[in-house]
Amino acid sequence: MSLPSARPPSSQRRAPDLDSREARAFVERAASHPSASKTEEGRGEPPPPVLTRSTAAQKELLRPLTLRIPDSLHARLLFIAENGSKSMNQFVIEALMPAVEQQVDKITRRKELGLD
């Protein structure tokens, strides 16, 4: 025996009134937002500044990165996280930061020398 649904039958569901005063006000507010007037090419955000050691130490916005790694490496990172004091993310960030800094320095030097 099944219990009756808490939702009304589909014939009794109300479709939103898109011609209502509230709906028109919402659309007008959205259209007047500064981001609504930008052109397609103007919508792109400028690239983030290159982080130096001094700015990397400050609290900053974290962005997700999807990274495909071998299962064996994931298992070892999980082992570190479960048996250590750092999460997988913290460990990877701390291990990756010196390599990123080194590569940024290398690229910057090459650009200064006119090699790239």
Image (cartoon, rainbow, N blue to C red):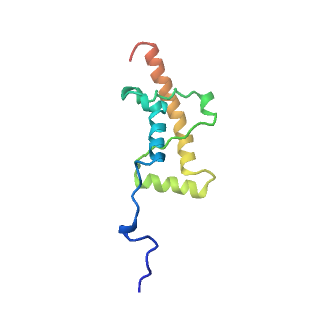
Residue 41 quadrant: top left
Who's the residue at 38% across and 71% down the image?
Answer: 9
**Residue 78 point in image, percent of width and height:** 52, 56
Instruction: Please give left or right for residue 85 compared with residue 36 in the image.
Output: right
Front one among 54 and 60 = 60
Residue 80 quadrant: bottom right
Q: How many marks?
A: 0
Instruction: Please give left or right for residue 80 compared with residue 30 in the image.
Output: right
**Residue 44 point in image, percent of width and height:** 42, 30
Q: Is residue 77 above or below residue 28?
A: below
Q: Quadrant of the C terminus?
A: top left
**Residue 22 point in image, percent of width and height:** 48, 47
Q: Is residue 1 above or below residue 16?
A: below
Who's the residue at 40% across and 48% down the image?
Answer: 19
**Residue 87 point in image, percent of width and height:** 58, 51
Who's the residue at 48% across and 30% down the image?
Answer: 34
